[in-house]
Image: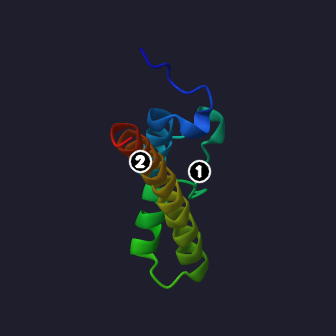
Amino acid sequence: MVKPPIDRSEDLLYLLNQIADLVIGNEDPVDVGINQLSTLPEMLSYISIHPTNLKGLMTTEAKLKDLGDKVKVLQDLVYVMKKKVYLRDNK
């Protein structure tokens, strides 16, 4: 039986949970504030209503980049796993 990774940076489900939290807008109760625009759904809603607000657009763009980076890490980990299987099977 394969043990799950101890390092959170290589735990696929932990990374997926981080992505889901970012996309859904889950926050810890201590992080929640009124009109802070700290979650992606809040930001997208805000820029839909205020499409000329440059600060809102830049903040949303940064949050989307963060999302893309997290997805890229997940893709890279799956790719490495696939390569390991390929190398193991083609000795």
Which residue is outermost to the bottom? Answer: 52
Kindly state the secondary structure of the residue where label 2 is placed.
helix
- Residue 88 numbered tag: none
Mark 1 or 2: in front is 2
- Identify residue type, mark 1: Ile
User: What quarter of the picture does the C terminus occupy?
Assistant: top left
Residue furthest to the front in view is 91
The residue at the far right in this view is 30
Q: How is the image coloured?
A: rainbow
State the image quarter where residue 55 is shown. Answer: bottom right
| Residue matched to label 1 | 34
Image point (34%, 43%), residue name: 90
Which picture quadrant has residue 32? top right
**In the rendering, at what x and y percent does residue 64 appear?**
49, 65
Whether residues under marks 1 and 2 lie with C-beta atoms below 8 angstroms apart, the answer is no
Residue 46's place in the image compared with 32, above or below, is below
| Disc with the residue nearer the chain's start (1 vs 2) | 1
Q: Secondary structure at mark 1?
A: loop
User: Where is residue 47 drawn, in percent x and y?
Assistant: 45, 73
Give the distance between the C-alpha atoms of the residues marked 1 and 2, in whole angstroms: 46 Å
> Where does residue 54 sit, x and y in percent of width and height?
57, 82
Is 40 located above or below residue 60 in the figure? above
Q: Position of residue 1 (x, y in %)?
A: 41, 14
Other residues around mark 2 within 10 Å, as few (<14) / some (14–19) / many (≥20)? few
Judge from the rendering whether residue 65 lies leftward or rightward of residue 48; answer left or right: right
Picture layout, residue 45 above or below residue 24: below
Q: Residue at x 50, y 23 (%)?
A: 4
Q: Residue furthest top?
A: 1
The foreground one among 61 and 30 is 61
Q: What residue did someone put label 2 on?
A: 83
> What amino acid does circle 2 point to?
Lys
| Residue 28 drawn above or below residue 63 | above
